[in-house]
Amino acid sequence: MMGTIFSSLPIWIIYIIIVLLIVFAVRSGIAYARWRRTQFLNENDSAINTLVGATLGLLAFILAFTFSMTTSRFDARKHFLLEEINSIETSWLRSDLVAAPYNSELQKALVDYVEIRIWLIDNPEKVKQVIKKSQELQTKIWELITELNKSDLGNDIINALLIDAVNDMFDNQTRRISIGVNDRIPNLIWIALFVLIIIAMFEVGYLLGKTEKSNWVLVFALSMAFATIVVLIVDLDSSKGHITINNQSLYDLYDRIK
């Protein structure tokens, strides 16, 4: 649910929404503190600093935990991209060793396999279409290998090495889809994060409400700082975010095999 909402909104709108949410929470805390000051003149708030510190500590923990999840996933995406590139190139090199006409047909299919990935870089919103096309190409590649082995053409060892490389190539696509598309921060963690942000900012507002005049410049600075961290996590969690992995290795592979 939360991932779908974040994916459908531009990053700057998400940023503004988070800033306004934090400002609203702080403003509510200030209003509540001033209301209590009129109702309870001699109230002892000596423990409120401890409570606010504990809440902010919990918020820092879940922010660090969520950020760690997204960075680990980002590193995994880079790793599996390199693994897939290596397996594709290995398959392309080994396909040149098998008998004609299967060698040229396999290499053409592998070039198409890389082209569709390069097209995805410029069209990240078409990921489902690219996955479908990749699966069609995988079926075509496997049919060619099956025909090759049934025809008893070429060296069995070479054919086996080609099959091994192609299997690795297929497995790496599955890993990339799992890490890059399917695995996202669970909705429960997003809910916990935003609940803690609202509670922590409400408590900060309560402390500010105990003073004679609130410094709204610092309130907006605090809101923008927290919103920046949350937006960074949102962008890293999205496979279509502004922070992207370097795809130069994929372009280099395309230049080599084309």
Image: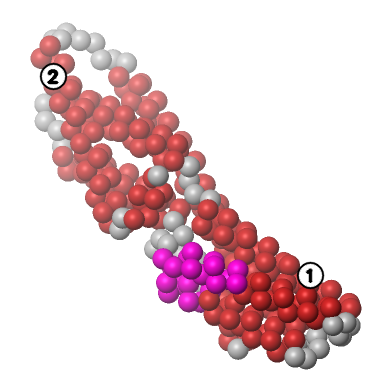
Colour pattern of the rendering: secondary structure
Residue 122: where, in percent of width, then height? 43, 74
For mark 2, give the secondary structure: helix
Going from N to C along the chain, the mark reached first, 1 or 2, is 2
Query: Residue at point 25% right, 15% down?
Result: 45
Q: On the picture, is 229 further left or further right than 110?
A: left
Residues at circles 1 and 2 in contact by the CB criterion of under 8 Å: no
Nearest the viewer among 106 and 151 is 151
Residue 175: where, in percent of width, then height? 62, 59
Residue 143: where, in percent of width, then height? 72, 75
| Closer mark to the observer between disc 1 and disc 2 | 1
Nearest the viewer among 128 and 78 is 128
Q: Which residue is mark 2?
A: 35
For mark 1, give the secondary structure: helix
Q: Main secondary structure of the magenta part?
A: helix
Circle on res. 164: 1
The residues colored magenta run 117-136
Q: Is residue 64 visible?
A: no
Q: Is residue 188 visible?
A: yes
Question: Is the residue marked by circle 2 packed among few (<14), some (14-19), or many (20+) residues within 10 Å?
Answer: few
The quarter of the picture where the C terminus appears is bottom right
Query: Residue at point 13% right, 21% down?
Result: 34
Spatial CA span between label 1 and label 2: 72 Å
Question: Is the residue marked by circle 1 packed among few (<14), some (14-19), or many (20+) residues within 10 Å?
Answer: some
Q: Quadrant of residue 165?
A: bottom right
Tell me the kind of residue under disc 1.
Answer: Asp
Query: Residue at point 18% right, 33% down?
Result: 27
